[in-house]
Image (cartoon, helix red, strand yellow):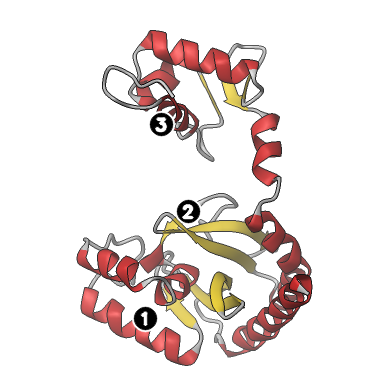
Amino acid sequence: MANSASGESMITRIVRVIETFSEDRTSQTVSDIGRRAGLPPSTAHRLVGELVANGMLERDDEHRVRLGLRLWELALRGSTAHRLREVALPHMERVQSAIREHTQLAVLERDEALCLEKLSHPRAGANIARVAGRLPLHASSSGLVLLAHADPKLRERLLAAPLRRVGPETITDPAHLRRTLIEIRRFGRAIAPGSIEEVSTGVAVPLRRAGAVVAALSVVLPREHPPEAALEVLVRAARGIEGDLRSERR
């Protein structure tokens, strides 16, 4: 793959173009894409044109660019994350029916918690998580579960870096976070009041496949709600999902 004058490969530049899109920025001009991707205008126009021609990006009637359906199609083919979501969804619906707030499924991806699915009641409380959105591992109940069971090298790397405060009670002290992760591994759950929103409590449990934690199942409750009932429902759902994953391997 040909490199640019800076030494970057074509694939690296394409990834940078695609990463300029976000939940809040679904369409852009080519000039904006180039500026955000740090590419010369000529390079941005060429790459965007090729990606449009191959269906990875699309142009609307105003000639703004957005992610293409072809990219979505390819991303789902053989995706383990997509299959995990399919297996988990019926159990998540039962959790949501009982809790009637927010129910979420997240996986570890590039040192962050990536939300694969989210079910929300119309009158549910505050929650900033979005499907395909990311949260810092130390700042959400799902992230804490994933971090507690992650590779030790990842944990040490995160503990050595500054811990950004997201909510009023986000854990930003490394020693406190280390103790919290030990407790999560010991008790099999994370309870995180005020970690993201002062008015909310995140409650999460691990999902295992072949003995390894592959995801976290969580609910977001109003702060005044005790977490015990939600934990019972989550643990039951997690066992159901794990059972379905085991059956799938036979």
Q: Position of residue 89 (x, y in %)?
A: 74, 65
Q: Which quarter of the figure has residue 249?
A: bottom right
Residue 47, horizontal then vertical, whole percent: 49, 17
Query: Please, what is the three-letter code of the amino acid marked with disc 1?
Result: Leu
Q: Is residue 187 above or below residue 119?
A: below
Q: Position of residue 211 (x, y in %)?
A: 57, 81
Q: Nearer the viewer, mark 1 or mark 3?
A: 3
One can see residue 78 in this view: yes
- Mark number, residue 248: none
**Residue ID at (30%, 85%):** 179
Residue 120 can be seen, yes or no: no
Alpha carbon distance from label 1 to label 3: 35 Å
State whether residue 73 is above or below residue 110: above
Query: Dot 1 lies on which element?
Result: helix
The first of marks 1 and 3 along the sequence is 3
Instruction: Report the quarter where the C terminus lies.
Output: bottom right
Q: Nearer the viewer, mark 3 or mark 2?
A: 3
Q: Residue at x 74, y 80 (%)?
A: 243
Disc nearer the start of the sequence (3/2): 3
Q: Which residue is mark 3?
A: 12
**Could you say which quadrant of the image residue 37 lies in?**
top left
Give percent across and percent down for residue 57.
60, 24
Q: Which residue is mark 1?
A: 181
* Kind of residue at badge 3: Thr
Question: How many numbered marks have been drawn onto this rendered protein structure?
Answer: 3
Q: Nearest the camera: 239 or 130?
A: 239
Amino acid on which disc 2 is placed: Arg
Q: Circle 2 is placed at which residue position?
A: 134
